[in-house]
Image (cartoon, grey):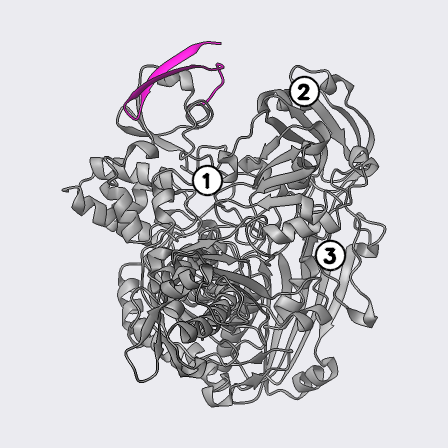
Amino acid sequence: MPTVSMTVNGQAVSGEVEDRTLLVQFLRENLNLTGTHVGCDTSQCGACVVHVDGDSMKSCTMLALQANGADVTTIEGLAKGGEMHPMQQAFMDNHGLQCGFCTPGMVMSAIDLVAKNPNPDEATIRSELEGNICRCTGYHNIVKAVQQAAKNMGG
Amino acid sequence: MVENGIGASLRRKEDNRFLTGKGNYTDDINRPGQTYAYLLRSPHAHANINSMDISAAKSAAGVVAVFVGQDLVADAVGGLVCGASVTGKGGEVNKTPPRNVLTMDKVRFVGDPIAVVIAETLAQAKDGAELIAVDYGELPSVVSTSAADKPGAPQLHEECPDNVALDWELGDKAAVDAAFAAAAKTASVDLINNRMVTNPMEPRAAVGEYNSGTDEITLYMTSQNPHVHRLVMSAFMNIAPEHKFRVVAPDVGGGFGSKIFTYNEEAICAWAAKKINRPVKWTADRSEAFLSDAHGRDHVTKAEMAMDADGKFLAMRVSSHANMGAYLQLFSVSIPTLFHGFLLAGQYTTPAIYLESRSVMTNTAPVDAARGAGRPEATYLLERLVDVSALEMGLDPAEIRRRNFIKADQMPYQTPVVQCYDSGDYDASLDKALANADYDGFAARRDEAKGRGKLRGIGLSAYIEACGVAPSAAVGSLGVGVGLWESAQVRFNPTGGVTVFTGTHSHGQGHETAFAQLVTERLGVPVENVEVVHGDTDKGQFGMGTYGSRSLPVGGVAIANACDKIIAKGKKIAAHSLEAAEDDIDFAEGNFTVAGTDKTMNIAEVAFTAYVPHNYPEGVEPGLDEIAFFDPLNFSFPAGAHVCEIEIDPATGTLEIVNYTAVDDFGVLVNPMIVEGQVHGGLAHGIGQALLEGCVYDEDSGQLTTGSFQDYCMPRADNLPSFNVDYAPTVPIHNPLGVKGCGEAGAIAAPPAVINAIVNALGIKHLDMPATSEKVWRAAQAAG
C-alpha cells in the first residue's frame, strides 16, 4: 500500500493507505480524529468539511493520497491553548448546534466563509452554507452565530 | 432566586465537546479485534428468493462469516416486533405479518436485507457480498398508498388480505352523516400528506461486543431509547437476557423518531458478536439509510366539513389511507389511528367527528413515527380544510377560526375524539400571532408585491399537539404495548456534587443542560455541580427514552419528584443535626433552616452527613440517593398559531418565505434558548415537507427514486428564512412543572401555514405538498 504524508493540525503525520482510501477515512480511522463526520455518500451534507491548504474541502470527496503534502486542519485543531476559535464560541453563544453531528463541518465551512467574506450579510451566509445540511437547527441560530463570529474575527 | 434555574437561557453544557470534535458518536467507537458487517439487500421491490449461494462469499479474502436468515432462526432469534395492537372495525385487531431479522423466502421492498457478510474490513465485507449469488423470481409490486387495497393489487402477506393491516374508525358515523345532510354549507378537500425520510444527520450505526468471560453482550448504537431497545431485543428477539445485555446510546446525531425502533442491523451486530466472539460494527451509509430507515407520513385523505350558515363547524368527516410499507414497524398502525384521529378536533368545538383510516401494506420501506407522528397529518388536513371552509363561506381564515375556537373558559375541554385538553387559550395565541405578523397590513404588502410582478400570500395554522403520551393504563387499553412513564435518579455524591440519571435520552435536545437547571432550581445546587447521565443501561435505571416531546413533561417531573424525596430525607438529617423538629425545617435555595432562626445547613453538608453518619437520626438510612418514577395523568397539550407569508415569482415558480411568525403555548420554559431552537428545527422540518421533501418510489419498478441527498431535497440554509418566534403560555393543570412539550410543534404547524399561504397567493383551492417550484409554476400558469 502506498504511504501518504501530510500535516494535520500542525503535526506531521503519515500512514499507509489504499488507493481508494478517502481523506475522511484517513483522518477518522488512521489518525482517530473522529470529530470530522460522514453524513452522506454524495458530497451533499458537508459534515466532513476540513481545511486543506486553507480552503474548506469535503474530505469525503478527496482521496487521502490527493492530500499528500497538504496542510490539513480539522475541528480538533481550531481551539488554541484551551480557548475556542471565535467561530466555535459564536456557535455556543448563539445555540447554533443541537445534536452536534453537522457542527464540525458547519464550523469549518463558516470559518472559510468569513475568511473570504469578512462582512457577510444574511443572504450571503445562507447561500455560502448551501453545502452543509443541518436537520436540527433550521439554520436560524447558525446564521446568527456566523454573524457574531464575523464581527469577532475582525471583519 | 436561584441562579441558572428555570427560565435561564443557559449556554449548553454539551456544546464544548460537540464544538471541539470530542463528541462520541457510535461510529467513533472502535473495539479491539473489531470486524465489519455489510448487509446484502434486495434490489427488487417484490421477489421470491428461489435460491441463494453464499459459498464463494464465505471463502473470500478477509471474510470472517456470512449469515442468512436461517442462521438466526436456528439460534432461536426472534423476528422484529410491532408494538401496536389497535382494534379496528368489527373488533378486529391489526394483522401483523411476521418479519425475520434477515428475510428468507420473499423480499418485499428494495433494501430488504437477506444476508450479512462480516469481514476484517468494510471493503472486504462489501467485496464478499458481491460474491453472493441470489436467484430472484420477480413479482409485481405495489407502492401506491391509495391503490394498495384495490382489487388486483399484488399481495404482500398472506396475513393481510387486500394488503389491509387495519381498517379503523373513530366517532359516530350516523351522527356525522346526519349533520352533513342538514348542513347549510359543506367544504371538502382531497390531499396527500407526502412521505418523508426522517434523515437525522447521523446515519444509524451499531457496534456489538461479547465478553465470553462474563457472557455479556454490549451494544453501542444510535438509539433514542436504549432501555427499550434492550427490552425488545431481550424479550422478543432472544438476543440475551436483560441482565446480561448492556445497550449504550452515546452521543446520537439526531433521531426525529427514526432511532426509536428496533431494526435488523443493530440486532445482527449484537447477535453476531457473540456468534463469532469478536466485535461487529455496522454503519449505514446515507443510501442505506434512505432504503432501510423507517419513513414517515404518507397518507392519502379526503376531508369534509359541515357548517351552519355562520360558518360554525357542525361535523367533520375524514377518510384516509395510510401507507405502512412492507412490514409493521414498532408503532406503525397506531400512528394513523390513535396519534392522528385523537387530534382531529384541533382547536375547535366541532361536535361530531368521524374518521375511517385504512393502514395498507406496500412494497416500500416500513413507515412509522417521524417528528410529530400522526399529529402533523391531522393538523395538515384540518387546517387545510378550515381554509377551504373559509373560502366556501367567504370568511377571513382568522375569522372562521375564531368563530369555532374552544374558548379559554371552556377548559378543560372534552373533545368528541377521546382527548380532554387541560389548558389553552387559542384566541390569545392567534391574536398575538396576527399582531406579530402584521396581518392587518398584509393587503398593502400584497399590492406592493403585485407592482413588482410577485404574488404574495398569507396563511394561518392554528394547531394543537398532544405529547408526553400518557397515562400508561390508558395507552395500554388502546393497544400500545408499553407503559409511558419516566424515571429519574438523583444521587448526591458525598462531596455535594449531584449526578442525575434520566430514563430519557438526549440526541440534540440539550437535556444535560435543561435537566441540570431543573435540579438547580429545585435543590439550589450550582448548575456546574449537576451532571446529567443518560443513554447507558448499565448506568441508569430503566427508562422509556425520548420521543413524542415527552422528555421534559414526563422525564422532567420524575427528576423534580426525585429531588423532592431528597429534600424530604434531607429535612430529617438537618433536623437532627440542627437539634430541631423535622416539621420546623424549611428548605429553600439549597439551605435547610430552622424556621424563624438563623440555624441553617447547606444541602451539601447534609449530603456529607448522610454518607458519614456519625451523628445521625435514628431509623434513617445513610446515603442521599433517591429514585422516582412518574406516570402522568394526561397528555401535554401544546398549541399555538403560526402565520406564514410568502412571495411567488409566477414566471419561474420560485417561492420565498418572507415572514414566518410562530406564537406557541409551551407553558413554563425551562431554557428559553433551547426551546426556541426546538421551534426553529421543527419549523425547518415542516417547511421542508411543505416545499421540498418528498419520498418517491417508482410506480412500476418499486425502486426508491429519491435515494440520496441529491434526489431527496433536504432544506438548506438558503431555503429558509429567519423565524419570528414568540409565546402565549397557559398553565397545564396536569403537569406539576407547568411545562408542555416543544419538540414537534414546528413540524406540526408549518405545513398547513405554508400551503395556506401558497393557495392564498395563487387564488386556488389546494396544492399538494411538496410545493416545488415546478408545481407552483404550473399552478401559477393555470391560475393565470
The residue lying at 66 percent from left, 89 percent from top is B182
Q: Position of residue B669 (x, y in %)?
A: 38, 69
Element on which disc 3 rests:
strand
**In the rendering, at what x and y percent does residue B237 appear?**
75, 46
Which amino acid type is marked by label 1? Asn
Identified by mark 3, the residue type is Val
> Which residue lies under the disc numbered 2?
B63
Label 1 lies in what chain? B
Q: Amino acid at mark 2?
A: Val
Q: Residues within 10 Å of mark 3 (few under 14, many from 20)?
A: many
Give the CA distance from mark 3 to mark 2: 40 Å
Which of the two discs, 1 and 3, labels the residue nearer the N terminus? 1
Label 3 vs 2, first from the N-terminus: 2
- Percent across and percent down for residue B611 are 46, 59
Q: Residue at x 83, y 71 (%)?
A: B90
Name, please, the residue furthest toward the top: A2
* A95, above or below B76, in the image: below
Q: Which residue is mark 3?
A: B360
Screen quadrant of the N terminus of chain B: bottom left
Q: Which of these two is toward me, A125 or B766?
A: A125
